Amino acid sequence: MSKEKGHIVSEEMLYRYWANDLSKTDRDVVSQWALTSPSNQRQLDEAEVFYLDMKALATLDDKNTAQTDKAWEKFKSQNLLSKQPPHKKHQLLPPQYLKYAAGLLLLLMAGWWYISSDNKQLEIATLEDTQELQLADGSNITLNQHSKLSYPETFRDSERKVSLKGEAYFQVAANKAQPFVITLNQAQVTVIGTAFNIDATSADHISVSVDEGTVRFSTISEEVLLHAGESASLDLYAKSLTKLAVPETPTHNFWRTKSLSFQNTPLDQVATALHDSYGSNIQLSNPALATCSITVHFENEELDNILDIISSTLDLKVTKTEQSYYLSGDGCH
C-alpha cells in the first residue's frame, strides 16, 4: 500500500483499476500515482498482467479444489494481495478462479511474479516538465513536456524497440547486433548508436534531426538516411519525406539545453528566437531596431533577465504589458 498526496493506493485498487471497477476520482488517483515513479508504474503493469490471467482462467471448471486451495494460500502469502486493507473486501473475480490461477502458475514452476517480470512493458509520460531516463541498454533519453515513451524493462529481441508520442532527445548506446527502433505515427526511426532529436508533437508532420551518427527515418513506402548535421520532415498528410540540413537556429534543442547563443544576430531574429523559446510576444517599436545585432550567450536565464541584458547592451528600453514586451530605441549606427 502506498500514499500519494493524501490518497491511499492499495493493491486492491490496482486490480480494480484494470477491471474498470473504480470511480473516476479513484482512477485519477491511481493514474497519477503510477506516474510518480517507475516502481509504481511497474506495480500497475503487474496488476494488469495478473488481471488478464484471471479473466483467461474464469472459464475453468470447479476441479481439484483442495489442491488449488493450498496453492492459493501459498501464492497469496507471497503476493501483493496478501495485505489488502481490512475495509476493502471486493475481489475482481470469484475466489475459486484466483485459486485456479495460483495452482496453474505454481504448476509452471515459475510463480506469477517471475512470469510478469519477464520483459515487462513500461511507460513514462511527462506533463509540464521534461524528464530524463536511462534504459536497460545504457541509452539515455530526455522527454519533452507532454510526451510519452513506451519501452521494455529489458531488450531481449533482435531489435531494441520503443515507441514515442511527443518529442524526445535520444543518445543511443551502440550495439550493431541489436538496432534501436523507435516507432512513431506512420513512421519509424532505426539507429545503431547515435544522438538525435525526434519531434512528433505536431498533428501534420514529424521531424528528425541528427547531432551524431547515422539514422534511418522510414515509412511504409520510403526512407531517408540521415547523418550528423542533417534532418528530415515527414508530412503526415502527403505521406512524403523531405531531407533538410539541420537548421542552425539559436533555439535548436532549447527545450532540452535551456541555452541560447546569438552570434552577431540581428535583433528581429533575436526577438523571433525568444518568442519561440519562451512563448512570449516581443515587438520592436522602431523598425530601425531590426538591423541592430548582438553577440551573447544565455544559460538557464529568465526572459526578463535576457531582455534587460539586451536592452542594456543596445541602449534600448523595455516596456512590459500583460501580453507583450516592447523594445524601443533610436536604432543602431
Image (cartoon, rainbow, N blue to C red):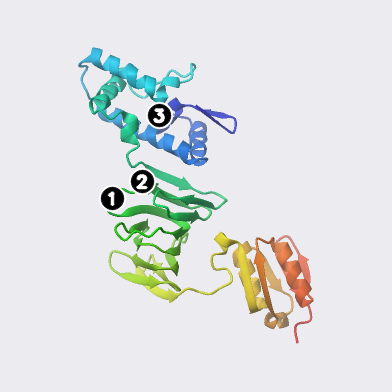
Identify the secondary structure beneath mark 3: helix
Q: Nearer the viewer, mark 1 or mark 3?
A: 1
Identify the secondary structure beneath mark 1: loop
Asked whether the beta carbons under mark 1 and mark 3 sit within 8 Å of each other, the answer is no
Horizontal arrangement in the rendering, residue 168 relative to residue 263 (left or right) = left
Label 3 vs label 2: CA separation? 24 Å
**Lower sequence index among marks 1 and 3:** 3
Identify the secondary structure beneath mark 2: loop
Asked whether the beta carbons under mark 3 and mark 2 sit within 8 Å of each other, the answer is no
Q: Which residue is mark 1?
A: 157
**Lower sequence index among marks 3 and 2:** 3
Horizontal arrangement in the rendering, residue 222 relative to residue 168 (left or right) = left
Kind of residue indicated by mark 3: Tyr
**Residue 103, x across and y down, in percent:** 26, 22
Quarter holding the C terminus is bottom right
What crowding class fits label 2: few (fewer than 14 Cα within 10 Å), some (14-19), or many (20 or more)? some
**Residue 12, x across and y down, in percent:** 43, 25
Label for residue 154?
2
Residue depicted at 62% across the width and 68% down the height: 260
**Residue 330, x across and y down, in percent:** 79, 81
Kind of residue indicated by mark 2: Thr
- Of residue 242 and residue 49, the one placed in the foreground of this image is 49
Image quadrant assignment for residue 92: top left
Label for residue 236?
none
**Residue 295, x across and y down, in percent:** 67, 76
Give the residue furthest to the bottom. 333
Q: Which residue is mark 3?
A: 15
